[in-house]
Amino acid sequence: MSKTLLVGTWADGVHVIAGGLRSHELVGQSVRGLARDAEGRAIALVGGHKICRRTFDERAGVHWETLATCEQDLACCSPVRGALLVGTDSEAALLRLDETGVVSRVGGFDAVPGRSSWYAGQAVVDGKTVGPPLGIRSMARNADRSVTLAAVHVGGAPRSVDDGTTWHPTFAVDWDVHEVAAHSERPELFAAATAEGLAISADAGESWALHTNGLHAPYCSAVTFIGDEVFVAASEHHFAPRGSIYRCSLKGTGRGDVELTLVGGGLPPWLGGIVDTACIASSGKVGALVDASGQLFVSDDSGDSWALRAEGLTESSSIVIL
């Protein structure tokens, strides 16, 4: 594999896997929301409040430069024309970082119809109510850059067709979406990992169908496309001790029911806990995922075979392939 993998962690920076080498960057810092910018460089949200970009020059080597610092707790990001959209983990606010380094709040996202019905996720663990705040978990932009989706926990997946200026709701809030993904070549295809199953759209996010056929449990936490197939993580719940990865083909229109099958080819049927939101990624024929136990599995052949590439990557927050 010639590509470089970056695995962010909640408390100890970024692990970099390139060829047979492994290195460690931003040591001791919280890193989440790893993504690629419009030029293919890594973007990360560091320390909860900084938007940083990974660059390289011959004199300084690898360097993470701070593009902006924000008061809000930052969660995810996605490039749009001339800017970077950044979702927050508080208030489900959407920010825009423009080319001059100015950060502004996107008023159109605050005005999404039905926003008053959004709510923070909750679960009862050991008799205590816990759960993440109302926040934007992920974003995805389709192949022709005409549509952007934002996964709100818990608030559905608002859709924008004007580079993030205005937004409109799509599927039901109570589907409890965790991650949205876009096909890299077919602009009509989106997928979403929800607590009710795998959601697929074949019309660029305007309408959705929910699928659970073949899953051992409907709770889906992460999703990506590799070629014309969707790969989705499923488990019994967020704190489940094991989870699995399933795949389904979308070679046709993507409409109708789909059959989800367990991924094999060296990937264990049961992983060490769930593969969380943003912890599965793809680029071309390469796929990568990291589970809750810190195992990193990589495929070089569109998900047909998988190999364990690293262990001990615990508390992983996100992964990106450069």
Image (spheres, rainbow, N blue to C red):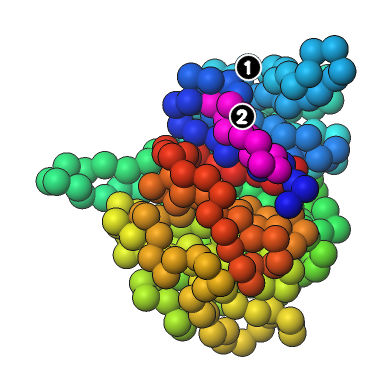
Horizontal arrangement in the rendering, residue 46 relative to residue 196 (left or right): right
Which residue is farthest left? 127
User: What x and y, as percent, mark residue 109?
Assistant: 62, 42
Magenta-colored stretch includes residue 291: no
Please tell me whether mark 1 sits on a helix, a strand or a loop: strand
> From this viewpoint, is residue 134 visible?
no
Q: Tell me the tag on residue 112.
A: none
Left of 320 or right of it: where is 40? right
Q: Is residue 23 magenta?
A: yes
In the rendered structure, which segment of residues is drawn in magenta? 13-24
Asked whether residue 270 appears in the rendered view, the answer is yes
The secondary structure that most of the magenta stretch takes on is strand
Tell me the amino acid under the disc marked 1: Thr
Label 2 to label 1: alpha-carbon separation? 26 Å
Residue nearer the viewer, 201 or 310? 310
Left or right: 269 as drawn, with respect to 22: left
Q: Which of marks 2 and 1 is in front?
A: 2
First in sequence, mark 2 or 1: give its number: 2
Residue at 66% x, 83% y is 255
Secondary structure category for the residue under label 2: strand
Circle 1 is placed at which residue position? 69
Residue 65 position within the rendered picture, expressed as x and y whole percent measured from the top left: 72, 18
In the picture of the structure, the residue carrying the numbered disc 2 is 23
Q: Which residue lies furthest to the top in this view?
A: 59
Quadrant of res 57: top right
Which residue is farthest front?
A: 20
- In the image, what residue type sits under mark 2? Ser
Label 1 neighbourhood size at 10 Å, few (<14), some (14-19), many (20+)?
some
